[in-house]
């Protein structure tokens, strides 16, 4: 059975590798649609609150009103210096890659799977007219690519087994 949940958060970012308007610091209201695979056992259907109780606070704590930033973006070092100089603490969500919506999908998908959920598909809406649909196959492909680029950080065979062998079971 597939269960769909929707979430949102607000965040700033920039794409430092581009030479267009998106290179500038700007923000989005991100819409996140998660499609989970679950196995129902018993007479009661899945409680949507089981997803919300983990995912909503996690999004609020790590992503909402944060600066999504690539650790190799020169702006990151400037922000660190600003924090040291002023004592101000900025909420920054660090990325190993540029903060494109595709890389955001990879990051969100990985972290949601780490929570123990079996995610079939993730959709991230960056603007009113632009949405990326990111599937489990996309995630597995990216994990392989990123693992070969960065060592074994993203090559967790247990996460694939978690989704393929045992969907989240709800009472």
Image (cartoon, helix red, strand yellow):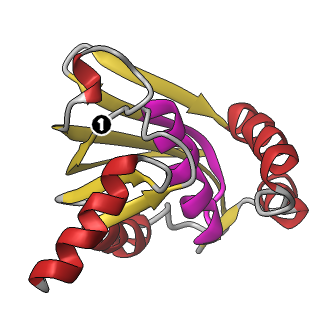
Give the prevailing secondary structure in the magenta stretch: helix
Image quadrant in which you'd find residue 136 = top right
Image quadrant in which you'd find residue 145 = top right
**Point 26% across, 71% down: residue:** 81
Image quadrant in which you'd find residue 135 = top right
The quadrant of the image that shows the N terminus is top right
Estimate the x, y position of residue 27 in percent, counting from the top left: 16, 39
| Dot 1 crowding, Cα within 10 Å, few <14, some 14–19, many 20+ | many
Magenta segment boundaries in residue numbering: 101-123
Residue 51: tell me if it is visible: yes
Estimate the x, y position of residue 75 in percent, counting from the top left: 31, 50
**Point 22% across, 81% down: residue:** 84
**Point 49% across, 62% down: residue:** 46
Badge 1 is on which residue?
14
Residue 113 relative to residue 51: left or right: right
Residue 56: tell me if it is visible: no
SS at mark 1? loop
Q: Along the line of sight, which residue is nearer the eye, 158 or 163?
A: 158
Estimate the x, y position of residue 118 in percent, counting from the top left: 66, 56
Q: Along the line of sight, which residue is nearer the eye, 86 or 58?
A: 86
């Amino acid at each position: 059975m597939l269960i769909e949940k929707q979430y949102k958060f607000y965040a700033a970012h920039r794409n430092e590798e581009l030479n267009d308007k998106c290179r500038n610091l700007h923000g989005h209201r991100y819409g996140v649609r998660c499609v989970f695979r679950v196995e129902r056992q018993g007479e009661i259907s899945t409680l949507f609150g089981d997803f919300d109780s983990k995912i909503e606070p996690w999004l609020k704590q790590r992503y909402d009103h944060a600066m999504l930033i690539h650790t190799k973006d020169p702006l990151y070092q400037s922000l660190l210096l600003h924090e040291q100089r002023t004592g101000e603490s900025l909420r920054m969500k660090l990325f190993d890659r540029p903060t494109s919506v595709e890389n955001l999908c990879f990051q969100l998908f990985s972290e949601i799977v780490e929570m123990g959920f079996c995610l079939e598909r993730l959709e991230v809406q960056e603007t009113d007219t632009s949405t990326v649909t990111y599937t489990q196959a996309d995630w597995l492909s990216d994990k392989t690519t990123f693992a070969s680029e960065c060592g074994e950080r993203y090559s967790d065979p247990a996460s694939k087994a978690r989704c393929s062998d045992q969907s989240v079971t709800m009472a």
